[in-house]
Amino acid sequence: MTAFRPAPAWLSDAVFYQIYPQSFADSDGDGIGDLAGIADHLDHLAWLGVDTVWLNPCFASPFRDAGYDVADYLTVAPRYGTDDDLSKLVDLAGRRGIRVLLDLVAGHTSDEHPWFRAAADDPADHRYIWASHGVPDGFVASPGTRPGGFLPNFFASQPALNFGYARESPAEPWRQPVDAEGPRANREALRTVMDHWLRRGVAGFRVDMAASLVKDDPDKRETSALWAGLRHWLDGAHPQAVLLSEWGDPAVSVPAGFHADFFLQFGGPANGLAMRSLWNNGAGTRDTAWDPLDCFFDASGAGSPRPFVEAWRAARAAIGDGGFIALPTSNHDFSRLNCGPRTADQLPAAFTFQLTWPTLPAIYYGDEIGMRYMPGLPDREGSVLGPHYNRAGSRTPMQWDDSPGAGFSTAPEDRFYLPLDPAPDRPSVAAQRADEASLLHLVRRLVALRTANPAFGHDSPVDVLHEGYPFVYVRGDRFLVVVNPARTPTSWSAGGTAGLLGGVREVEVSGVRIAADGAAVEASGFGHGVFELAGPDEGADR
């Protein structure tokens, strides 16, 4: 198969912003966010400097899994508005230089999807994975006249679409090959869905659980081949569109055809560990199967950036110039940066790192003001996945201002999609806009710094000078970055690199001092700083 077309040029400089539509802004007073509410706040995103937004699923759904149970891929859910409302949002965002990505749930549908209702009564329909006799372990009994049962993904109400099995077995006759009729029809359906929304102006898709399509595919060879075929179609039909995967293993997913993939708390063997050891985002939601880790961006100072750096280097080496790695602050499935024992004063160092490291940054709505993870919330649309894993705490309403409804909705608060943070000092966009020293202004300045300087780009080099507390690195041979996520002060002796650090200029600094001769770097607790290195005629030893 021929090589992929290079990624659209705009992607290399993208700053992503994830919006959970139910919780961002409610325009009609029903307590649930909607597309018009997002449109009403596009100026905030433009002011912040983000240029690419991805929305969690906004298609028609019974919402047993917050919209990840799709009942109609080609229709916007009425709770969010209409198809025309989405087109209007895309147009208004485009006028502000912001692209919109949709969330594509490729591996399963709702059990209310017409495809499934038809399959439940037709033994000849192979769009889903069916066992014709009995209900094997892991399957769900047929709800229709068709005998046997179907294989779900996650919840029983989410029947898995049939993309085939990498390995067949006579003992399990439901294992169809990837080129069988059902898998071929589903691959064609993915093209149809993507083409429909791309023609309406969206810029691409974030693909949910992209590694899960072909079953029993241990090396992901068949799943990779599936996505490679879709990428080649996309390159020809929509060359400016992008595919961003929820795979968690860029070394595999990008060569398979995705333009970019997230480092996530799960994924490849090194990447999940890397993210959990960077900022765990698991307090209150961590799966009990995850080993406790000393997290580098926790205040104890017991962690290390090394697992992340090593995983990032390995992924970059595997990807080459074929695509990108995205680094999120958090998302709808994991706790926010401000969670558990972590507090708001620890966030500036985290953002300084995220917005200066050579990955594509993805900011989860509300993280830019330090919204906190809310423990102890009730199950809402499938948010609870286990005794220690409730995602609702990361999905609470956006805090726009200090009014009783936080500017999210005019509905009574007992009708809100999820409760507001009840803390009297909860942060808000309005309050932080008025405070130049706020986290929001820092994030805005860092985004602007990144956007204005190619030295911070994904493809610009990084030279790690100290892999510890403080974490010290140089970007593009031009900027020095220092972060100390620990609460205790720390220092680093520059040794042979002292000449490099002499005569630096402060760009964005709080609690970091560099000796005039460059011999030492001192960082207060939670200190962070970006410095411009002296030019060749300015530094005595350069």
Image (cartoon, rainbow, N blue to C red):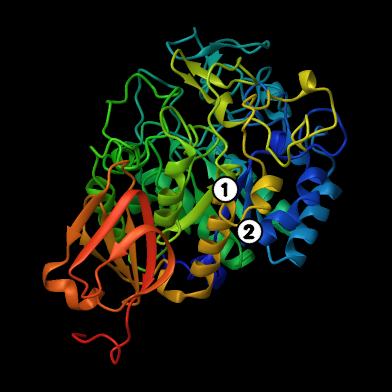
On the image, the x and y values in percent for residue 103 come to 62, 44
Name the element at disc 1: helix
Q: Is residue 373 left or right of residue 424?
A: left
Q: Is residue 381 left or right of residue 263?
A: right
Examine the rendered structure and indicate whether residue 263 appears above or below residue 236: above
On the image, the x and y values in percent for residue 3 come to 42, 68
Of residues 434 and 14, the one drawn nearer to the viewer in this rendering: 434
Along the polypeptide, which appears first: circle 2 or circle 1? Answer: 2
Q: Which residue is mark 1?
A: 368
CB atoms at circles 2 and 1 under 8 Å apart?
Answer: yes
In percent of the image, x 73 and y 37: which residue is there?
402
Q: Quadrant of residue 282?
A: top left
On the image, the x and y values in percent for residue 294 come to 26, 34
Confirm whether residue 357 shows in the render: no
Residue most extreme to the front: 516
The CA distance from mark 2 to mark 1 is: 9 Å
Of residues 503 and 201, the one drawn nearer to the viewer in this rendering: 503
Residue most extreme to the top: 134
Q: Which residue is mark 2?
A: 48
